[in-house]
Image: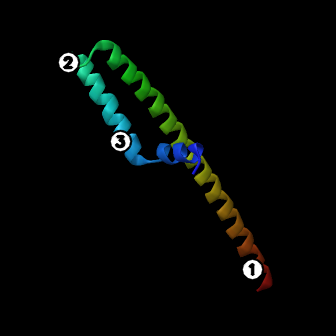
């Protein structure tokens, strides 16, 4: 398994999305409550924003691909129905 495949698998995982969300929220709250130094909180928030952006882009892209696949399947079924109706 290549690094690209591993990254793709992680970015498409709902568990990874939940973990990133929880970690970002936790570090934000920790920084706000002064449990975590400000610099670490800012860095963790930046990493969380980047990872969230990657997850959003990945899910958007996958949704777009699924929508196109659905359209193509509908077009194929319509063509098969027309061919079937001509035979009858």
Q: Residue at x 32, y 19 (%)?
A: 41
Q: Position of residue 53 (x, y in %)?
A: 49, 32
The disc at residue 18 is 3
Looking at marks 2 and 3 on the same chain, the residue that comes earlier in the sequence is marked by 3
- Image quarter where the C terminus lies is bottom right
Q: Quarter-wise, where is residue 57 in the image?
A: top right
Residue bearing mark 1? 85
Q: Residue at x 47, y 28 (%)?
A: 50
The disc at residue 74 is none
Q: Is residue 14 left or right of residue 53?
A: left
Q: Position of residue 61 (x, y in %)?
A: 58, 43
Q: Position of residue 23 (x, y in %)?
A: 32, 32
Q: Quarter-wise, where is residue 71 in the image?
A: bottom right
Numbered label tally: 3
SS class, disc 2: loop
Residue bearing mark 2? 33
The 10 Å Cα crowd at callout 3, few under 14, some 14 to 19, many 20 or more, is: few
Tag 1 near tag 3, CB within 8 Å: no
Q: Position of residue 77 (x, y in %)?
A: 68, 69
Looking at marks 2 and 1 on the same chain, the residue that comes earlier in the sequence is marked by 2
The 10 Å Cα crowd at callout 1, few under 14, some 14 to 19, many 20 or more, is: few
Q: CA distance from mark 1 to mark 3?
A: 49 Å
Q: Nearer the viewer, mark 1 or mark 3?
A: 3
SS class, disc 3: helix
* Vertical comparison of 79 with 38: above or below: below
Tag 2 near tag 3, CB within 8 Å: no
The 10 Å Cα crowd at callout 2, few under 14, some 14 to 19, many 20 or more, is: few
Q: CA distance from mark 2 to mark 3?
A: 22 Å
* Vertical comparison of 41 with 4: above or below: above
Residue sitting farthest toward the bottom: 88
């Amino acid at each position: 398994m290549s690094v690209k495949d591993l990254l793709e698998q992680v970015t498409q995982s709902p568990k990874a999305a939940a973990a990133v969300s929880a970690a970002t929220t936790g570090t934000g709250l920790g920084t706000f409550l002064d449990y975590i130094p400000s610099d670490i909180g800012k860095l963790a928030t930046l990493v969380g924003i980047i990872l969230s952006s990657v997850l959003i882009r990945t899910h958007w892209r996958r949704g777009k691909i699924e929508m196109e696949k659905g359209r193509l399947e509908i077009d194929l079924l319509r063509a098969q129905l027309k061919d079937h109706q001509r035979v009858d």
